Structure formats: structure tokens, C-alpha cells
Amino acid sequence: MASIRARSNGGNLFFDFQYQGFRCREQTLLKDTATNRKKLERVLAKIEKSILNGTFEYREYFPNSNMIKKLEAVQPEAEPEPDTPLFKDFAKEWLQENEVRWKDSYRKIIEGTLEKYLIPEFGKKEVSNITKSQVLKFRASLAKVKRGTQRALSNDRINHIMTPLRMILEDAADRYEFSMPLNGVKALKVDKTDVEPFSLEEVQKFLAKVRSDFRDYYIVRFFSGLRTAEVDGLQWKYVDFTNRRILVRETIVQGQMTTTKTPESRREVEMSTPVFEALKRQQKASKTSRTFVFANARGNPLEHRNVTQRVWYPTLEKALLKRRRPYQTRHTAATLWMASGENPEWIARQMGHTTTRMLFTIYSSYVPNITRQDGSAMDRLLTSEGFDHA
């Protein structure tokens, strides 16, 4: 097993690991201290990972090592150049060519997928030699992957891993003129995400139990329809009190400010009275940040995972409400707007949707449960117009 050890004479640290059947011990000039050990352990972790991925270059880490000659002496004769590049090489080239099109957050997701799943599986294979059978076996193996002690990867997560694989092989097949191995391979079926909006009564219960310093934050979330990244990245320069509008221009993703999720997400959200008053109170009480509307004690944007665990879920428990994701606040705004009779096209603009289709597909079934009218609106209309039904 690879380790960091100390010499008996002098106490300098050295690397001790296995590579291509050899035991490799590479000396350093660092003394045996806790700090130095941690530093070398990080390097050793990178070495082990690159060995596992087949990308380890001995000279890169130890350019003056005597082991280099020994390793070269046992290297087999060079194989002829492949007709098409290895997957790991083409994937790197593909990433460089396409990353300009992506947000940093998406690029990091793709890089992580390549490094964790795709390179270890297909890295040493020529792109033209990857078969449908190999791809299907790989996909089946993902269904057995465990995340720590949690459940296996979901179909949705597996589909997201398969997406860059498909894009890479499609590009390679077009460039090198071979048959695309994923032709006819459909994405795994994914169950629809449950939409569980709060009733107005539940919203009131939640707001009655939430910490006072987060009450206005959740009022804005429940009654504006903003996404988590939009409300957490909201800046005062985008709050137009004069026209009672929130200008959605930037979001925060993985700690970085970026553009909106889609072009349609760049929008103006009308402030209802609760939202307007909540933002006014927040402006008056804000002491940590002149930039962000909702900030932590250091004036930085809120970290949504931290807020979810420390505020959201504990409040649901205190209010005796069903456990559900914070994103349900956005769904709640949509259903409350529909229940109150707002124009569907206006609601769609508030939400950042291009059409009203999603409103009627996802939310309309919840409206009767909130209003408890179930058709009584028609009765009121006919009565108000003096319609004689006798």
C-alpha cells in the first residue's frame, strides 16, 4: 500500500508506492513533520489516482529518478499508432473545444464526470473500438454504484453521466467516420419529480416558526417564485423599489456569480406587498452587506446547503410540516398565483417560462386543493351576472 515514510538516518520523508510491478521509493528533502506529511500525502493521492486512470507519467513527478531507466528497460516495443485516438485523449480535446460554450458550473460537472466515471472506464480504448455492448455494461454497472452508505445512483444521475459520453462519441464518430455505438440506446426512464407546494396555511405555519433573521428571506422565496440560485445571488442593485420589481440578472452557482439559468430566466418579477415589505425590512436591517440582499455574517452570499440543513429542515420539524425540498417554495408561488386567479401568461413571465404549458401541466391540479372551490368560481360568475338557471 502506498505511503509516506521517513528515513531512519536523517528523518527525511520519502514516497513508497508500487508501479508496474516495481516498488518505488522516491526521496524528498522534507523533514518529518505533520505539515510536510500532509503535503506529500496530497501529492501521493494524485499519483495513485493517475496510476489508476492510466495517465501517470513518472518523469513528470520524479524527473531525475533512477527508476526511469529501469522502467524504460522493461517497456514493450511501441505499438503502432491507433487509427483513432484513445478516448482519454479525444475527451480532453473535446472538452477544450466545447468549454467556451458552457458556464463554469456546467464545465466542472462535465470534468468531474469524465474524471470519476468515463476516463477510468474508457480512457485506454480507441474511440472507434468502443462498442454498444461495452457502453450498456458500463451503464448497468452504474446502477450498482453506491454513494457512501446511501442508495445506488438514480436513473436520472446515470443519464447525466451518459450524456457527455454520448456527445463525445457522436463527435468522434462524425470526425473519424465510424458507426456511433450509442445509436438506438435510449435514456433510462426517470420518474417525475414530485411537486409538493405548500398551502397558504402551511406557509403561515412555517413563517411563524422560522428564525426571525430568516423570515423575510422565506417570505421572498414563497411569494416571488425565485429559484434558490436567484434569491441567494440577489443584489441590491437589482431591487427596484420605485417600480416594485426584482430584476433577475445574475445567479450564484457553486459560490460563483453567473448568468441566469436560461435566457428566459432573465426577467422582471413584480413584487407583491409581502415581498415589497420584506425587502424594505431587509434593507433597513442589513448590516453585513451592501451588495447582496441576503448575506451571512461576513457579508457573503448565503450557502444554500448550509441554510437548508440549519434553517429549512429544522423549521419544517418545528411547524410539524412534511419534509420537502426548499425548491417547493417556487412551486408554492406558482400555485398560489393560479389559485388567486392571476393571468397565466403573467405567471409564466414571473416564473421565467416561455409559455403557459408548464403551468397547466404541473400546477393546475393543485389549485383546487388550495382554493377549496372546485368549480365554485363559475357559480359566482353566473350569479353575479344574474343568470337564471331555473
Image (cartoon, helix red, strand yellow):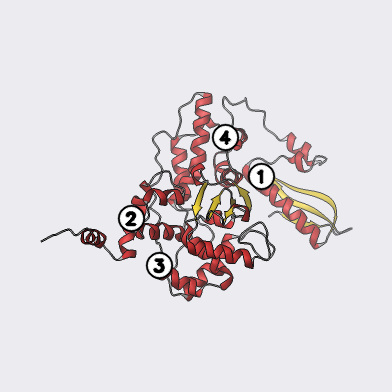
N-terminal label among 1 and 2: 1
The reply to whether residue 322 is in sight is no
The residue under the point 32% across, 64% down is 371
N-terminal label among 2 and 4: 4
| C-beta proximity under 8 Å, tags 1 and 4 | no
Mark 4: secondary structure: helix
| Frontmost residue, 208 versus 22 | 208
Q: Which residue is mark 4?
A: 87
N-terminal label among 1 and 3: 1
Q: Which residue is mark 3?
A: 200
* Quarter of the image with the N terminus in it: bottom right
Q: Residue furthest left?
A: 390
> Percent from the top left, x then y, of residue 23?
73, 48
Identify residue type, mark 2: Ser
The residue under the point 55% across, 31% down is 126
Displayed quadrant of residue 96: top right
Q: Real-space Cα distance between discs 1 and 2?
A: 54 Å
The residue under the point 39% across, 58% down is 337
Q: Which residue is mark 1?
A: 51
Identify residue type, mark 4: Phe
Relative to 328, 239 lies left or right: right
Identify residue type, mark 3: Leu
| C-beta proximity under 8 Å, tags 1 and 3 | no
Q: Which residue is mark 2?
A: 364
N-terminal label among 1 and 4: 1
Q: Real-space Cα distance between discs 2 and 3?
A: 16 Å
| 274 up-or-down from 237: above or below | below
